[in-house]
Image (spheres, rainbow, N blue to C red):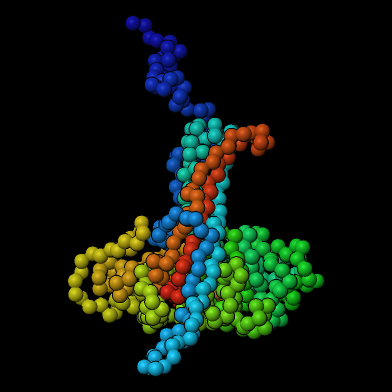
Amino acid sequence: MANPSLAEYLAQSQRGMYQSVFGPDYIQKGVFTVDSDTNIFDTTYGRKVWQALNNQTRFFNAVPRVVWGNTAGWRVRSDRGAQRSRPVTEVGSLPSVDVSQIETISSLPRIVSTTFGASVKSVFTAQMEGGIGDVLAMENEHAQLDHIKEINEEILAGSAYRINGSHSTSAAAFGAASIRNNFKIGDVVDLYDVDGNVWTNHGFPVVSYVGNTISIDNTGLAGSEVFGVTPANGDLAVVRSRAGFTSIDDVVMQDNVGVGGVSTAGNQFASGGVRAYDLTFGGRDLGLWNAAATVLSNDGVGRDLSLNLLDTCIQKVRENGGEPKLILMGHDQYFKLERLLNSQQRYMGQEEYQVGIGSERTFPGTRTGLVLATYMGIPIMPDADVPKSVASNGTTVLGSNIYVLDTDYIEMAIAQPTQYVENRDYFAANQLIVRGLLYTMGEMRCKNIWVQAKITDLNA
C-alpha cells in the first residue's frame, strides 16, 4: 500500500472531528487566534452565569400572603367610649351613652415592575462558542430573582434617616450610598435642615434618582426658597409616602420619635418631632391611635443589644393585646444575640430545632439557644435587607434594627399575582430588541400597629 498523500492523511486524521448527531459544523472550532497579552488561545467562557449578588428574600417569604379582596381599606376601633362602662348602684343612673372611636385606614395597591431586554444580535451571538447560551432565558431567570428582591427591599426600607448632602431651591442631593435601598424613585420625602430649623413646607419633593446619591426633584414647587437654609451633614430625610410597597419600618413608627437626636419643634406638622409615615392618606396625628407602635430609639447614639431591650419589646406587644410571632433582625444582631444567650446557656437538651415561618425556616439551632433559632419560643429570622440606623452625624451607619412582630395582623395583599409580558414588536420599540416585563400589584398591610415593636440605634 502506497503512502497516503498529505491531503489524504489530513482528511483521515480529522474524520469525525467536526461531525456529530447535530449535523456538520455544529461544534466546529472557530478561527484560531492568539491573545496578545498571554500568547495563548483567546479565553473561552463557560455558559453558566454565576450570581455575585445576594438574592435572599426571607422576610417576604415569611409574611402571610392573601388575596386582595373587595376593599380599599378598613376601619380601626381606637377608643372604647368615655365612661360607657362603670359601676352602678342600686338606684344609680346608667352610664352615659357613648360610641366607639372609629378610624379609617386607606390601602390601595402598588405596582412593582422589572424589565429586561436583549437585542436580536445578542440573542444570536450568545449561542456561539464562549457565549452564555439562551440570553433571554438567562435574563428572565435573573429578572425574576431581581423582582422578588426588589419587593423584599421595599417592605424592609427605613422610614427616616440623618443624612449628609446639600440642596437648593430647584434640586437636592444627599450622599446615601450605604442606605440607598431605603429610597425609591417616586417616594415623597420631607427634608429638614437642623441648623436652620426649616422643613420643606412649600411642596412635596419627589425622589428622582437613586444611586450613590439620592436626588430630589423640586421643579415647579411653590416658594422662592423651598429648602430654606442649605443643610449640612446631620440633616433629616423622612419618607412621607411610598411609590412602592409600604415597609415594616413605616408601620412600626411613631410621631415625635427621635431620629438621630433631631429636635424638630415648630415644623410644618404643627407638632414636635418626626411625622410617622402616612397610613391614612390624611396624616398621623401626634399621640393618637396611629402612633401606638413601640419604638425604642436612642437619638442616633449607638448602643449594644441587650436582653432588656428585647424583653421590653416583647412585653409591650403583649401589654397591647398581641403575641409576638416573629423577631426580625440583620445578621449582625443575630450573632450578638447568640453570644448574649450563649453565656447563659443551660445545657438541658441539644436536639436540633427549627421553626417554620411562612415558607421560610429559622437557622438550625437548639431549644436552649447555643445555636440560636428562637428566643422565648419566638422564631428569629435574620435578613440581609433589614434597615440600619444612622448616627447623629448623618454619616456613620450603625447596626441593623430589630423588629418584634405579631404577624397575625401583617399580610402581603396581592391584587394581581406576578405577570410576565414579552414584546417582540420591533416597530413599536423602533429597535431590533426583545423586551420582557414582570410586574406585581399589591401592598403590605398591617391591621394592628399596637402589637408591633422595634429597636433602633444599635451598634453593628
**Would you place residue 291 above or below residue 431 in this image?**
below
Residue 310's x, y, as percent? 39, 78
In this view of the protein, which residue sits in the foreground, 309 or 106? 106
In this view of the protein, which residue sits in the foreground, 331 or 409? 409
In this view of the protein, which residue sits in the foreground, 82 or 208? 82
Residue at the spot 54% in from the left edge and 69% down from the top edge: 104
Extreme residue toward the left, this view: 349
- In this view of the protein, can residue 332 be seen by the observer? no
Extreme residue toward the right, this view: 224
- In this view of the protein, can residue 27 be seen by the observer? yes
**Would you place residue 399 above or below residue 22 in this image?**
below
Residue 163's x, y, as percent? 61, 73
Kindly indicate the quadrant of the structure image that contains residue 426.
top right
Residue at the spot 27% in from the left edge and 66% down from the top edge: 365
Residue 100's x, y, as percent? 49, 77
Disc tally is: 0
Residue at the spot 50% in from the left edge and 32% down from the top edge: 127
Q: Quadrant location of the N terminus?
A: top left
Residue at the spot 74% in from the left edge and 77% down from the top edge: 229
Kindly indicate the quadrant of the structure image that contains residue 235.
bottom right
**Would you place residue 172 above or below residue 36 in this image?**
below
Kindly indicate the quadrant of the structure image that contains residue 196.
bottom right
In this view of the protein, which residue sits in the foreground, 440 or 319? 319
**Would you place residue 199 above or below residue 431 in this image?**
below
Residue 407's x, y, as percent? 40, 66
Q: Is residue 315 left or right of residue 245?
A: left
Extreme residue toward the front, this view: 91
